[in-house]
Amino acid sequence: MPDADLLAERFEAHRGHLRAVAYRMLGSLAEAEDTVQDAWLRVARADPAAVENLGGWLTTIVARLALDRLRSRAAHREEPLGVHVPEPIVDRPDNVDPEHEAILADSVGLAMLVVLETLTPAERLAFVLHDTFGLPFDEIAPIVERSPTATRQLASRARRRVRGSAAPSNVPRVRQWEIIDAFLAAARNGDFDSLLRILDPNVVARADAGAGTSLIGRSREVRGAQAVAKQALGFARLAPGARRAMVNGAPGFVVYDGPQPFAILGFTFRDDSIAAIDILTDQERLARVDLSGMEQT
C-alpha cells in the first residue's frame, strides 16, 4: 500500500476520536467536522514517519486547531457571552447513530457543554484533554503555552465549574420519556400545577435565540420552578409541533413550525424531575444541526 494511502487509512482509524475531541472543545458538530478535515490537510502535508504516538500527535493537531477557533470566537464577539446553548447532536428517539454514540460517550449532555462554554479557551482545552481524554499535563502545556503546573491549575479551575453538570442522570430512561410527555401535555393544556410537579424547585431554563429573537422570545435564563412553569405556559401554542428526539443522548424534542424546525430542547433530569432545559432557537446555528433523521419520524 502506498505511504499516502496508509496514512489516510490510519487517519480514518482515529477520525471518531478526533471528532469527539473537537466536539467537546467547540460544541458544534459541524465545526468539529471542519476542524478534523483541516487537521487531515495538515497531516497530509507532513511527514509522520518519526511520530511514535500517532494518536497523540493527531489529537494535539486537532486540539490546536480547535483552540484557534475558540480564540477567534472570543476575539470577534462584539458582546460578552450571555446565554449560549451549543449545537446539539440530534437522533431519532428509537435509533441513535453509532458515530454519535461514540462522540457522546461519557455523557456529554447539553448541560455540561453549556458550562464548558463559560470557560476560557485554555481552561476548556486543559479540562477536555486531561479529564476526558487522559492526556498528561506535560503534553497539554505546549498547546496552551503554559507550564505543566499552570496547565494543571487551568484544568482544576475548569473542573470546579463543571463539577456536577456531567453527573449521570439517576432517572431511568423510560421515566425520562414519561416526564417529557408530561411536560408537553401540561404545556399544551396550560396546566401550571402539573408543570410544577415535574420541575425541580431549582430548575434552570436557558433559551438561546442568537442575536435576534425567536417565536419564544429573546435569549434568556430563567431559574426556579415557578418562573420556568410560567415560561412553559407560553409554549402552549407551539407544543403541538414538538417531535420526540434524542438530544445529546438524552430524551428531548425538536419543535417544528409547519415543515420548518425552529427549536431544539434538551433536558437534564434529577430525582424524578426536570433539572434543566436548554433551548436552541438561533436559526443560523440551528441550520447547521443535522436533522435529516427526524424527517422519518
Image (cartoon, grey):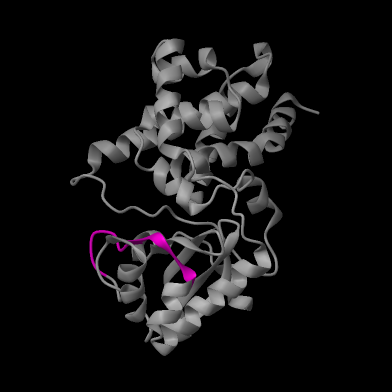
Q: Position of residue 246 (x, y in %)?
A: 59, 64
The quadrant of the rendering that contains the N terminus is: top right
Between 104 and 41, the one lying in front of the other is 104
Q: Position of residue 267 (x, y in %)?
A: 49, 62
Q: Residue furthest right?
A: 1
The quadrant of the rendering that contains the C terminus is: bottom right
Between 247 and 160, the one lying in front of the other is 160
Does 155 appear in magenta? Answer: no
Please report the residue visible at 43 percent of the width from the left and 89 percent of the height from the top.
Answer: 189
Residue 48, quarter of picture: top right
Q: Position of residue 200 (x, y in %)?
A: 44, 63
Q: Is residue 104 above or below residue 3?
A: below
In this picture, which residue range is highlighted in magenta? Answer: 198-213
Q: Main secondary structure of the magenta part?
A: strand
Please report the residue visible at 68 percent of the width from the left and 58 percent of the height from the top.
Answer: 97
Please report the residue visible at 60 percent of the width from the left and 30 percent of the height from the top.
Answer: 133
Q: Position of residue 96 (x, y in %)?
A: 67, 61
Count of labels in the image: 0
